[in-house]
Image (cartoon, helix red, strand yellow):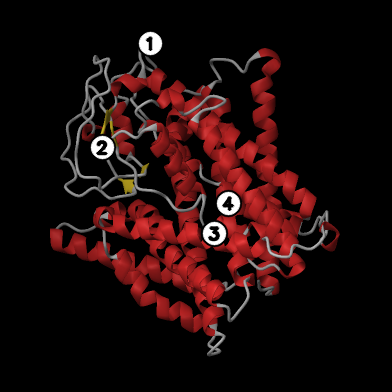
């Protein structure tokens, strides 16, 4: 998952929950909200729409207090009669999205720096293993997204909630699961939130490196300056950009970044298709040693599961999200085809010399290729703030809680933003290796969110419902879980080994 797109915040309703003071400033990507922030009526059959400024959220992480308060009216196990409850009839939405809008958001949420790293992933897998492996990986990740949506629907009905985000699905699945696991519901929520934080911090490090390496590639034609200098030069403007707290003011920035990304990808594809060599010039199958690196990069690229629930929750017609020809399948088929095409032709074109980003392989000195590097560097630079809002808004409420006055709270928030941006810059300086760091982020955090968490959540959610004939759901979830755990262990080991060996690409 990459460029997270600002979406309209879903407004929920919770009867019986104590009213709390609404936040005066919504954080654009991650909102620490209360159940009282959602207005609506359980009895209404229509889905009301409320207009408001589009300073929207993408990922909602609710406080433990709000989760406890929202479940206070349920029975002993937090379960209610779900037979007549339809969650989609109880959502109050700000600017609900159409199917096409949702498709565009899904594509933008899944396409970013990961697609430029796919040729390097193919190098670690081999041409044909990468070709079929990427399609299989896309199918598994898409199925896990469907699993998460299905669990969300089941838990929304079970607890009579209009909508849930990723961390809440984990929380409520444990709350209604086996008796011995209910004590771990808050822990499950914290784990999902923690790995979301790690994932986004990793994305920010990749963005820092990507921008610096592409600028260096352009400037090396004129001056030979160390990569660390470029990273330090980028630090000040990156801090200034991320001091803007309301994403509403960054909407033009996001639009520019999207246009530059599309243009850069198109020109990069044009370069890759020029004078393609024969398929026999590259390895059809790579060694087992590098295969875990392929897994990490591929799951990094496909890890868009964090945007799935916000997208579905915000649709005007959420019933069109799933299904064989629904928005989710349509979008992920497009994503998988793009990833496969870029990986296949990029590796075929540049072979074993392919680098961590395909833009780094474009010819030096040519005006068009230099424009691609500059445009992609600017696009990723402008997109950094979208990734950054997620981790900063996970930590910011905790930091602010230690201060009482408005001035000190605002000052602490500013210092936190400066510290986190500087932290990602320092990590990039310590590990100036784009390919392995992408694989490491994918293996550690993306695999946890995309491949490990969904089967665990589904097994626990349907514990009392059943796993189908011959327990097929249980076996299927178990196999996906083993696959994710193996990728986590071996991908992390291979990525760390390559980073420690100092191999650069």
Lower sequence index among marks 2 and 1: 2
Q: Which one is closest to the eye, mark 1 or mark 3? A: 3
Marks 3/2: CA–CA distance? 41 Å
SS state under label 3: helix
Quadrant of residue 190 within the rendered picture: top left
Q: Residue at the spot x=53%, y=89% of the render?
A: 222
Tell us which disc is closer to us: 4 or 1: 4
Residue 143 lies, in percent from the top left, at 59, 32
The location of residue 449, given as percent across then percent down, is: 54, 43
| Residue under numbered circle 4 | 301
Residues at circles 2 and 4 in contact by the CB criterion of under 8 Å: no
Residue 482 in the image, given as x and y percentages of width and height:
69, 38
Between 117 and 179, the one lying in front of the other is 117
- Which mark, by number, is residue 34? 2
Q: Which residue is drawn at 79% across and 59% down?
A: 289
Q: How far apart are marks 3 and 4 (CA)?
A: 15 Å
Q: Which of marks 4 and 1 is nearer the N terminus?
A: 1
Q: Find the residue positioned furthest to the bottom.
A: 223
As measured in the structure, the alpha-carbon distance from the residue carrying label 2 to the one carrying label 4 is: 32 Å
- The vertical placement of 318 against 406, above or below, is above
Give the distance between the C-alpha atoms of the residues marked 1 and 3, in whole angstroms: 50 Å
Earlier along the polypeptide chain: callout 3 or callout 2?
2
Q: Is mark 1 on a helix, strand or loop?
A: loop
Left or right side of 471 for 421: left
Are circles 3 and 4 on residues that touch, CB within 8 Å? no
Judge by depth and name the residue closer to the eye, 294 or 130: 130
Instruction: Give whichever of discs 2 and 4 has the lower sequence position.
Output: 2
């Amino acid at each position: 998952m990459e460029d997270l797109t600002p979406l309209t915040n879903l407004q929920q309703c919770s009867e019986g929950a104590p009213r709390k003071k609404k936040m005066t400033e919504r954080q654009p990507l991650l909102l620490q909200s209360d159940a009282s922030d959602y207005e609506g009526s359980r009895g209404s059959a229509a889905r009301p729409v409320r207009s408001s400024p589009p300073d929207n959220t993408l990922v909602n992480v609710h406080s433990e207090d709000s989760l406890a308060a929202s479940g206070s009216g349920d029975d002993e196990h937090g379960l209610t009669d779900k037979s007549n409850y339809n969650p989609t009839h109880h959502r109050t939405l700000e600017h609900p999205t159409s199917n096409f809008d949702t498709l565009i958001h899904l594509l933008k949420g899944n396409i970013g720096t990961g697609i430029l790293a796919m040729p390097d992933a193919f190098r670690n897998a081999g041409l044909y293993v990468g070709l079929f492996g990427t399609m299989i990986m896309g199918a598994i990740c898409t199925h896990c997204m469907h699993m998460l949506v299905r669990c969300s629907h089941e838990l929304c009905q079970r607890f009579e909630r209009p909508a849930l985000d990723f961390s809440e699905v984990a929380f409520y699945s444990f709350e209604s699961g086996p008796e011995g696991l209910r004590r771990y519901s808050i822990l499950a929520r914290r784990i999902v939130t923690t790995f979301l934080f790690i994932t986004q911090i990793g994305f920010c490090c990749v963005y820092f490196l990507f921008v610096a390496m592409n600028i260096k590639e352009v400037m090396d034609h004129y001056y030979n300056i160390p990569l660390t200098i470029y990273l330090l030069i980028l630090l000040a403007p990156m801090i200034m950009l991320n001091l803007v707290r309301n994403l509403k003011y960054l909407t033009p920035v996001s639009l520019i970044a999207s246009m530059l990304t599309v243009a850069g990808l198109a020109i990069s594809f044009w370069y890759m298709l020029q004078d393609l060599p024969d398929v026999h010039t590259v390895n059809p199958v790579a060694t087992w040693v590098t295969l875990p690196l392929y897994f990490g990069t591929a799951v990094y690229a496909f890890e868009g599961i964090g945007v799935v629930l916000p997208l579905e929750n915000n649709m005007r017609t959420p019933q069109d999200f799933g299904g064989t020809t629904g928005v989710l399948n349509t979008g992920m088929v497009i994503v998988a085809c793009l990833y496969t095409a870029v990986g296949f032709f990029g590796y075929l074109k540049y072979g074993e010399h392919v680098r961590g980003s395909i833009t780094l392989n474009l010819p030096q000195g040519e005006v068009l290729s230099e424009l691609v590097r500059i445009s992609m560097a600017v696009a990723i630079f402008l997109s950094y703030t979208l990734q950054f809002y997620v981790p900063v808004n996970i930590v910011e409420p905790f930091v602010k809680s230690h201060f009482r006055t408005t001035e000190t709270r605002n000052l602490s928030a500013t210092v936190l933003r400066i510290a986190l941006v500087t932290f990602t810059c320092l990590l990039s300086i310590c590990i100036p290796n784009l390919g392995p760091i992408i694989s490491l982020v994918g293996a550690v955090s993306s695999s946890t969110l995309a491949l490990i968490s969904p089967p665990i959540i589904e097994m626990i959610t349907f514990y009392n419902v059943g796993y189908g004939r011959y327990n097929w759901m249980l076996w299927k979830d178990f196999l996906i879980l083993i696959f994710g755990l193996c990728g986590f262990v071996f991908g992390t080991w291979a990525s760390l080994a390559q980073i420690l060996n100092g191999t650069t690409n």
